[in-house]
Image (cartoon, rainbow, N blue to C red):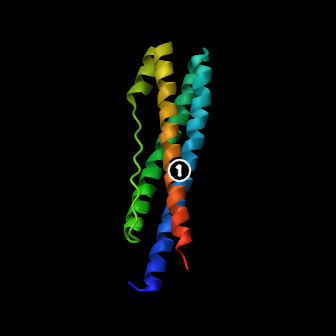
């Protein structure tokens, strides 16, 4: 592969990584908001806080799906420059069901725990993407 081709592949990887990073940051913002509403819900916020929390969780889930797609593209581009990042984010929906129908302290606490776990996974993914982007930018000519 020529230097020009290699540089093009690196630039494509940087663009894909930047898109993934942006998606992850948007997901983190929604998760932070859901976490804040979750605290209100734990303190007895009622149906409105439960609804707001789940609305933010739905936003975060859509953004995490976009981030997954962007991360797949990033991984594909990284293979073109002999690098690879294995980033996996999971979300579930059973606790949302339990939270609406049982709306008790245990279900609220479990949902808050899931929000915090998802935030940690997103933060870890952001850190990995930033590290790879930094390495990619270091090899541009």
Q: Which residue is mark 1?
A: 126
Position of residue 17 measured from the top left corner of the image (x, y, whole percent)? 50, 61
Crowding near the residue tagged with mark 1, few <14, some 14–19, many ≥20 C-alpha atoms within 10 Å: many
Give residue 137's position: percent from left, percent from top.
55, 69
In the figure, residue 27 lies in which quadrant?
A: top right
Q: Secondary structure at mark 1?
A: helix
**Residue 88, position as x, y percentages in the image:** 39, 47
At x 57%, y 49%, the residue is: 25
Q: Answer above or below: position of 61 versus 140.
A: above
**Closer to the camera in the image, 85 or 47:** 85
Query: Could you tell me which quadrant the N terminus lies in?
Result: bottom left
Q: Quadrant of the C terminus?
A: bottom right
Q: Quadrant of residue 38?
A: top right
Q: Is residue 82 above or below residue 22?
A: below
Q: Is residue 50 above or below residue 55?
A: above
Residue at 42 percent of width and 25 percent of height: 95
Q: Is residue 35 visible?
A: yes
Q: Nearer the viewer, residue 2 or 109?
A: 2
**Residue 48 showing in the rendered view:** no
How many numbered discs sit on the rendered protein? 1
| Residue 44 screen position, x and y as percent | 60, 14
């Amino acid at each position: 592969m020529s230097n020009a081709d290699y540089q093009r592949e690196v630039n494509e990887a940087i663009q894909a990584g930047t898109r993934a990073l942006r998606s992850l940051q948007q997901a983190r913002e929604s998760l932070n908001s859901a976490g804040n509403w979750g605290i209100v819900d734990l303190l007895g916020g009622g149906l409105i806080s439960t609804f707001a929390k789940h609305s933010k969780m739905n936003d975060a889930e859509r953004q995490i799906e976009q981030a997954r797609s962007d991360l797949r593209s990033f991984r594909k581009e990284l293979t073109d420059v002999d690098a690879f990042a294995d980033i996996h984010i999971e979300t579930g929906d059973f606790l949302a069901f339990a939270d609406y129908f049982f709306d008790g302290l245990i279900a609220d606490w479990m949902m808050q725990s899931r929000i915090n776990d998802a935030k940690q996974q997103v933060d870890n993914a952001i850190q990995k993407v930033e590290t790879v982007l930094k390495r990619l930018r270091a090899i541009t000519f």
